[in-house]
Amino acid sequence: MWVDPPIAARCCVWWRIPVGEKLCVCICIRAASPSSPLALPHPAASVLGPPSSVRLNELNTSTILNILPISNQQEGVAGGNLVVLYRDLRQKSHVLTLALHGAGGAISAPGPRRSRIDAGSGLLLLVPPLRSSVAAAASSSAGPTQTSATYLPSTPNAPPKIVPMQETLLLSAASIPTLDSSDIRYLLGDDTGRLLVLALLRNSGGITSLTLDYLGSVTTPTGLTYLDDGLVFVGSQFGDSQLIQIHPSDPFVEIREEFLNLGPIVDFDVLVDSGGTSIGTNVQAGMGQCQIVAACGCGKDGTVRVIRNGIGIHEQANVDIAGIKGMWNLRPSYSSPHDKYLIQSFISEARILSINHDEMSEITIPGIISTDETTLFCLNICPGDCIVQITDRRVSVIDCKTLRVVQTWMPSSQLDCGGITVANGNASGQIVVALRGGTLAYLQIRKHDDEDDDEDGGGVELEEIHITKLEQEVSCIDLTPFDTSTNSSSYYDNNKADSVMDIDSNSTPPRSKFVALGLWNDYTVRILSLENKKATSSINNNEATISDAPLDELLKIELGGDTQARSILMSTLQTNRDMLLIGLGDGNLISYAVNQDYIDSSFSGITTTKMTVSVSERKKVSLGSQSVSLCTFQKHLPAQEISNAAASSSKFHTCVFASCDRPTIVYMSGNGKKMLYSNINLNNCTSSIPSIENSCGAPEEEVINHVTPFHCELFPDCLCFASESTLRIGIIDDIQKLHVQTFRLNECPIKIACHADGNLFIVGCVSGQGNEDEEHSIIGDMSAGNVVRFLTNTFDEIHRVDLDPFETITSLVSCRLVNRATNTTSSDSSASMYTSHSGSRPYIIVGTAYAIPNEDEPSMGRLLVFETTNLVTNRSNDGGEMDSGGGTLNTTVRQITQLVTRGAVYSICPFLDGSILATVNSRTNLYHLHDVDNVYELQADRAYHHGHVLSLCVKSLDNTAIVGDLMRSVSVLDYVQADGTNTLREVSRDFNPNFTTAIEILSPHVFLGSETFNNIFSLQRNVNAATEEGRCRLENKGEYYLGEMVNKFVRGSLVGDNTNSSMDIASVVLGSRTLYATVDGSIGSVLGMDRATFVFFNTLQHSIVHTIPAVGGLDHGHFRSFKAERRSHPCRGFVDGDLIESFLDLTPSQMKSVVDRMNSNGGWKLSSTDDGEEEEAKNIQDRKVIGSKSENSSIANMKNLSVESVLAKVEEMSRQH
């Protein structure tokens, strides 16, 4: 059953009719007609049928309960009693009992059961037996009346029972099961987060009294559910939900677990990672990764949330060590559960760090060569419990007990080579080394059966299996065996540090069947066999086995392009998901799915079993711009990423760390269908608190060159990271899409901004003492005024500004202003003139309004200007932030000026030449900062614009600004300077009556907006229209029902700019990147696309809708249609990204059906250029947002799409947000 979004459902109740056990649902809908309809679906066994309506004459119905269902004996005639809580036209509350007859019958009142209760009543609870009810009353909005809980007995004319309550607003209630039949208990939650218990004491004569007790403080509850054994789930729309435990003694409430809820997101700003050009409203789209700093929650649940994409590092230790060329972790023995040694390789030496008790120090091991040679590889080997070290001159096998060399292999002089260049091995003792000149040697470490040799520590042999010659030198090698078991913890690999792994020294680690290697100057990757090919001859009934040497080539992979493979890795990222990953020297990562099989063939009586290897599902992703190095490690994935099948075998899953200038973790999704990429946030490496200074692009981002797992007793479940100058040991966050850090304010935030110069967060809050014991309503106390809090990056408050009574914060921005000097000392009146200073300075600007009672519209407000000063002092214990030079960085804040305005300052944005635009009621004013005889003044320019109903928001780009109006949608203003006169002139507007909530400029002529009916829309200014009317009208290019009210748009992206990423068969061309936040707590991204990309994804969207059944049979086109008041338009100009990415979760047969429909439709092909497209293409931003023919659309040249090509393009798009 559908209830259209413009129609608000006030309450709902369901019951089962005894006749035929049919289910009825009653929904009370607030309509425009004098009487509210009561929608009753047709009875059905399991599916809600079409509704039928009956009339309910009572308006403003808030609660409906069903009590004591009744039925007649005649089949099909049934009904139930309803108890309705409603308010009359005088805002008086009443409880009315009604009888509903049949599935399509009428409503009747069985008697004069109309009871007037407290005016603020908001909850209605059932009391056993079902013929009585309790009305829990909250304080009336008309005045501070006494609040009470009222019991309404079922006996006619019986007096109600009343218990007084503290004035409050009750939001939720839940019944508590009890074994004692003498009382009935309910949990009540109010707007201040107080948890109350209401007890109805009774005897054989009925309810005798009511008691009300306070249990404790929880998050502001909008839903309470009693689970069992004192466990209660507290659901909240204003903060994090909680699972609490109720105890019989004080403290009565214990918080067991919290569940993240970002809603409501009242305001947010962005921090730009390195590569970004600015902060806040001036973020250049696609120029760097952003972190969101959001003001969330209401009342005492107010918080500041730092939301970032990717994975942070919790640093455990660091030391300044420069020039590390490689790192490996070693254990004291193969069966040891913890690492002890960390080997670091330098150009001509190796250093060993060892864990001894609670210390980590540098040591020497006699068997490990540490001077005059470069270490290329180290590993614990299972056969003989040894350590293998490979340098540029030799392969050494070191006994773990004696720590001395027991076997050595060196290239013979006959090989005519200059030494070892690359090497790799695995725990089974297989070793492959590459020599100069392209020579490849395959070695094997085996254990002796002689017990005497085992006691002496020499019970192993190092055997040379085979040597072959390649046409090019080898650049990288890997022979990691694929995981053939269901439980990867059956053996221990140095590249797989599992903190809960039980290592069986008697178990044999798997052997690799082949080796993968990359070649210099060849741009290929080769896969060579490590097994002997066996052929069985049965000629003349005589059987013989013929063996061929290993290192035969099984597969040659052309990489394409002009960059060699610099790192290669074979790994099983998910159950039975064998992958080959290749890191290139230009920062690209190529991945393949590996398929292996054995084929028996017979010729001339000889049967040959041959192993075949093939690759498929090629993907190429740009991770950075420098060489990529790959390393595997084990990490516990979050529950949402683990499938049931995978979770049953192991809690730990193999991930790949790709080291480069933008390090990334690669892993498979829980269902094993798609490969996911999460970047590492190195800016959060040294602290869990974000640094604005590090997030604004000032410092150079640290480049990770080498990574290795390091699971030791001192640093469990850690990774070691080596950069050019630093060695770090740290734990990475859970691998998930977004990470959220929470900082509690204990006040209700309403505005937030980030100030890069002072390294500050500025938060505007509803006034409160900030004490956790202080209870604050979600409504707040506006008469006490608001407060502006200046917080450091560690969220310590350094300054606080209390505003006047009834003054509230309406806008807040951090921007740069140019200080214009005014000379008034000259006797010549004409000497007063403005001269700009040498540059701009950052300031904090706060806009306010005075919400005077009984005033329809604010008549006064203020513009407050603050500046920050950073002072570096000597080291002290004053709590300041430590500067990199060793001193203490102290930031001071002072107000330099203020300006009283004739109305509320609803929005502020930076504008041309270091000025600001501010919307004051219905006007848009331009302001400049002046220094009048060394006294700062904020002065209004002569340029202004009026004519709006209420100007709620303003955004600017160059000399153009757009204004979002309360009722008149979006207008475009141009700043014109001519003949010494400055004017703000309206040049275009949207004539649709949109109630705007947020706006953003995507390009000079393309704009994005949202409105109160949960829709978003895009507009375009046609500056090349033939008529003046066409140039003055904003064309509506897109409409889309989002389903949530957007509070703010900000240009930026939570992922880095991937414009350099390349797919071999697909390309996604993006333009603008815009983040938005909603009242319900959602964070989303709006990505502009070129025309070819839009047409492709729009066709894919229609194919998915017509091929895959929707959940509940909902019509996607109807749901996403633009609906506002009486307007309803089909969705256009937007593509549903969530629906597009659901393609990745389809089965192969479903994917094929979707792609077949796309090919039969052919709509993804661009046949011709639209009219006027050449004019639009003159501006690249317009082309990418609105759509023009793509210049890089190789997929458009394909005759038919394949599943692989569509999958690659969808995966690339999924990495863009």
Image (tube, helix red, strand yellow):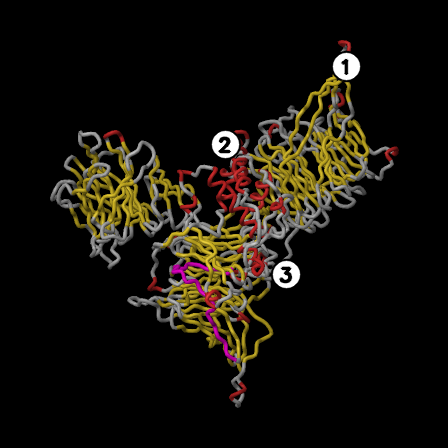
State the image coordinates of residue 742 (x, y, percent, origin top left).
47, 51
Q: On the picture, is 1127 further left or further right than 828?
A: left
**Tag 3 and tag 2, C-beta contact below 8 Å:** no
Say which label, 3 or 1, has the lower sequence index.
1
Mark 3 or 1: the one toward you: 1
Is residue 1214 something one can see in this rendering?
no
- Label 1 amino acid? Ala
State the image coordinates of residue 590 (x, y, percent, origin top left).
66, 41
| Distance (Cα) linking label 2 and label 1 | 48 Å
Give residue 227's quadrant in the image. Answer: top left
Residue identifier under label 1:
544
Residue at the extreme bottom of the image, as rendered: 827
| Distance (Cα) linking label 3 and label 1 | 77 Å
- Label 2 amino acid? Asn
Q: Is mark 2 on a helix, strand or loop?
A: helix
Quarter of the figure that contains the N terminus: top left
Q: Which residue is drawn at 45% across and 64% down?
A: 1033
Q: What element carries label 3?
A: loop
Residue at the extreme left of the image, as rendered: 157
State the image coordinates of residue 539 (x, y, percent, origin top left).
77, 12
Q: Is the magenta stretch mostly helix, strand or loop?
A: strand
Say which label, 3 or 2, has the lower sequence index.
2
- Label 3 amino acid? Gly
Say which label, 2 or 1, has the lower sequence index.
1
Is residue 1178 something one can see in this rendering?
yes
Residue identifier under label 3:
885
Q: What element carries label 1?
A: strand
Numbered label attached to residue 644: 2
Depth check: give the residue in front, 1184 or 571: 1184
Depth check: give the residue in front, 682 or 974: 974
Chain part drawn in magenta = 980-1001
At label 2, counting other C-alpha atoms closer than 10 Å, the crowd grade (few under 14, some 14-19, many 20 or more) is: few
